[in-house]
Amino acid sequence: MAVDVGQEAPDFELKDTHGATVRLSEFRGSKNVVLVFYPLAFSGVCTGELCALRDEFPEVTREDVELLTVSVDSSFALRTWAERDGFTFGMLSDFWPHGAVAKLYGVFDDDRGIATRGTFVIDKAGVVRWKVVNPVPQARDIAEYQKALAELA
């Protein structure tokens, strides 16, 4: 079942590119979270989207915003990709149990074993305030994330 706007965002914990545990709940009360699910590291559309987040999303430097990206890739693959392309935002591995967090948010494609392109803007209270879910081949519009964050300010 998909998470909807107005619902509390399900808490989770995943490993980042260095093996450290990141919990969604650790940002409660202090940061709005932009949670971005994508299918696979190193793929064309995913690389384009994450490069756009790196280059065209200055909100990631705000004290009250945390960008977390999630895929079913291993932490090792994500670290290699982050180093190659200069990604300094949170990259989390939903590798095992395979796609568990993507399933929790309703953005896991069981037939392909990957996440679809789901983005959730979560406020400081832990409530989903905006979301978009696109099919795997369709990139998302970062301007929409920026608009959703501006409404929370």
Image (tube, grey):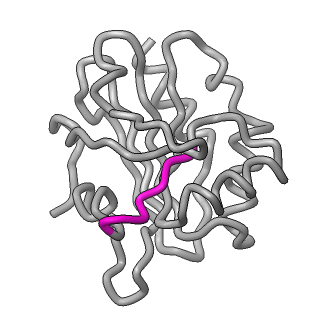
Residue 94: say if magenta.
yes
Q: Position of residue 108 (x, y in %)?
A: 34, 70
Above-or-below relation of 147 to 73: above
Q: What segment is highlighted magenta in the picture?
A: 91-97
Q: Residue at x 41, y 37 (%)?
A: 21
Q: Position of residue 57 (x, y in %)?
A: 69, 32
Q: Position of residue 115 (x, y in %)?
A: 43, 68
Position of residue 73 in the picture relative to residue 85 (left or right): left
Using the image as rendered, state which of residue 6 and residue 117 is in the foreground. Answer: 117
Position of residue 148 in the picture relative to residue 7 (left or right): right
Q: Residue at x 74, y 71 (%)?
A: 44
Above-or-below relation of 41 to 56: below
Above-or-below relation of 45 to 149: below
Q: Looking at the image, how many numbered discs can be counted on the residues?
A: 0
Q: Position of residue 31 (x, y in %)?
A: 41, 17
Asked which quadrant contains residue 101, the reply is bottom left
Q: Residue at x 71, y 35 (%)?
A: 88
The outermost residue toward the front is: 19
Q: Residue at x 51, y 26 (%)?
A: 66
Quadrant of image for the N terminus: bottom left
Residue 105: say if magenta.
no
